[in-house]
Image (cartoon, coloured by chain):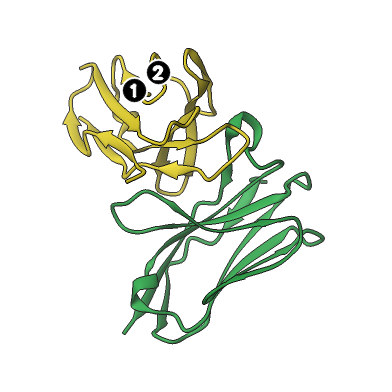
Chain colours: A yellow, B green
Amino acid sequence: EAQVTQNPRYLITVTGKKLTVTCSQNMNHEYMSWYRQDPGLGLRQIYYSMNVEVTDKGDVPEGYKVSRKEKRNFPLILESPSPNQTSLYFCASRIFASVGELFFGEGSRLTVL
Amino acid sequence: QKEVEQDPGPLSVPEGAIVSLNCTYSNSAFQYFMWYRQYSRKGPELLMYTYSSGNKEDGRFTAQVDKSSKYISLFIRDSQPSDSATYLCAMSDYYGGSQGNLIFGKGTKLSVKP
């Protein structure tokens, strides 16, 4: 089954404790992206990757890091989480940046205390 | 002025009603228009996609684009309780959008009551 898989789905952590949200897709997509979704603000792009080893900032990159060492994986790293990073996070992928449907994962709900 | 405006609702209708969901936008360069459906605790999934102005129909769903008014709509005929979800409009100036990104509306939460 074609899918984008995120883990963990739910996480409660404390300020400053580094965490990683993993994302994996099994569709051989070149393009992957991270979004956060907040009430009243909608979906906002954090980082994206056009291909392996190619990443760039989206609209709200502050406080986040990403890496793309393999085509299928695109982890989101919060080096020192803060409460304003409490949000619902989605990983998404598509075959290329300019082509194809954008497939979303099921989301990771993060709470930073 | 935000690039994409969408009434967040919530919108509650009885089963069988015709539902109209709308978005307005300010960027006249947008040419690709999409509607995503997001069920509770799930990721958004593509529902409809249209290019430029005009209508597109898929079963009970019709998407309309009026570029002259910078206004897009999604109509749901014979609405069902299973249509209860948040509907997000999304658009871009070309299919992938700049950076592969789409500009999303904030979403309208729809509830269809049996």
Q: Is A8 rendered above or below residue A69?
A: below
**Both marks 2 and 1 on one chain:** yes
Q: Amino acid at mark 1?
A: Pro
- Residue B36: percent from left, percent from top: 49, 55
Q: Using residue A35 as the reference point, say whether residue A5 is left or right of it.
A: left
Near-viewer residue (A18 or A74): A74
**Residue that appears at 32% across and 30% down:** A23
Q: Is B34 rendered above or below residue B99?
A: below
SS under mark 1: loop
Q: Chain of mark 1?
A: A
- Residue A64: percent from left, percent from top: 39, 20
Image disc number at residue A75: 1
Image disc number at residue A66: 2
Q: Amino acid at mark 2?
A: Val
Tally of marks? 2
Q: Chain of mark 2?
A: A
**Residue that appears at 47% across and 22% down:** A61
